[in-house]
Amino acid sequence: MMSNKESELTTAIMQYAIRCLSEGDQAALRNMNFGPREVEALREMNLGDMCHIETLRAHCLNITLNREAYWPMVAHMRNRREAGDLQKELIRSDAAQDMMQYFYGMGSREYVRLRRMLVVESISGRPPEPSEAETQVLWAAWKQHIEGREEILLRPEDYLALHEETGIALRAIWSQTRRWTDYGKLPAAANGN
């Protein structure tokens, strides 16, 4: 018995309707135009009936797109995909686990899983401290990124940009800028700037 797209759609909608019925979601059934007679017929359906639906070549549905719900859903999916892509890029650039925890609430298991999935080498110990010259370069770049902002904490994409601009390890950038942000420990040459 081969299914077709019409029968697959009808089966999926009927399964949804049966679930709505079992959960008592009368509003969802009404929104799909199920009246008392249709609900009663739905109650009588069994597994055999569902198998017979798969042989239908037509469906009994009137499907329309709700654009007011569709576009926010698409935007939400894009945002989730972009956030996931950004997380992967941060991991590939060797973001520290506490950075991923801070921005995304990512636990150590998820962090390790992503590192393995992306084939990122494990680094143990503290990140290397930037040299004095690197600290000055980082300070100047960081200052440009926070200029004109009320909030001096950078966004994840800003950290990636700093890493690309300066060539300094992302872990070191995270550690140093957190120190500047949290404790006000500014580089000596930068205090007067």
Image: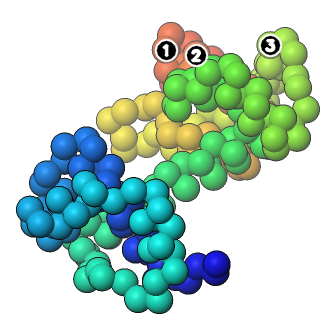
Residue 179 point in image, percent of width and height: 58, 16
- Seen from the viewer's position, the closer of residues 83 and 74 is 74
Instruction: Bin the neighbour count of mark 3 within 10 Å (Cα to Cα): few under 14, some 14-19, many 20 and up.
Output: few
Residue type indicated by callout 1: Asp
Residue at the (39%, 56%) spot, across then down: 46
The residue tagged 2 is: 179
Quadrant of residue 139 within the rendered picture:
top right
Residue 121 point in image, percent of width and height: 91, 32
Q: Which mark is residue 126?
A: 3
Residue type indicated by callout 3: Arg
Q: Looking at this rendering, what residue extends furthest in the bottom direction?
A: 57
Q: Is residue 143 above or below residue 79?
A: above
Q: Is residue 162 above or below residue 112?
A: below
| Dot in front, 1 or 3 | 3
Q: Badges 1 and 3: C-beta atoms under 8 Å apart?
A: no
Q: Which mark is residue 182?
A: 1
Q: Badges 1 and 2: C-beta atoms under 8 Å apart?
A: yes
**Residue 180 in sight in this render:** yes
Q: Report whether 37 appears left or right of 173.
A: left
Q: Secondary structure at mark 2?
A: helix
Residue 22 point in image, percent of width and height: 27, 44
- Seen from the viewer's position, the closer of residues 61 and 181 is 61
Which quarter of the figure is the N terminus placed in?
Answer: bottom right
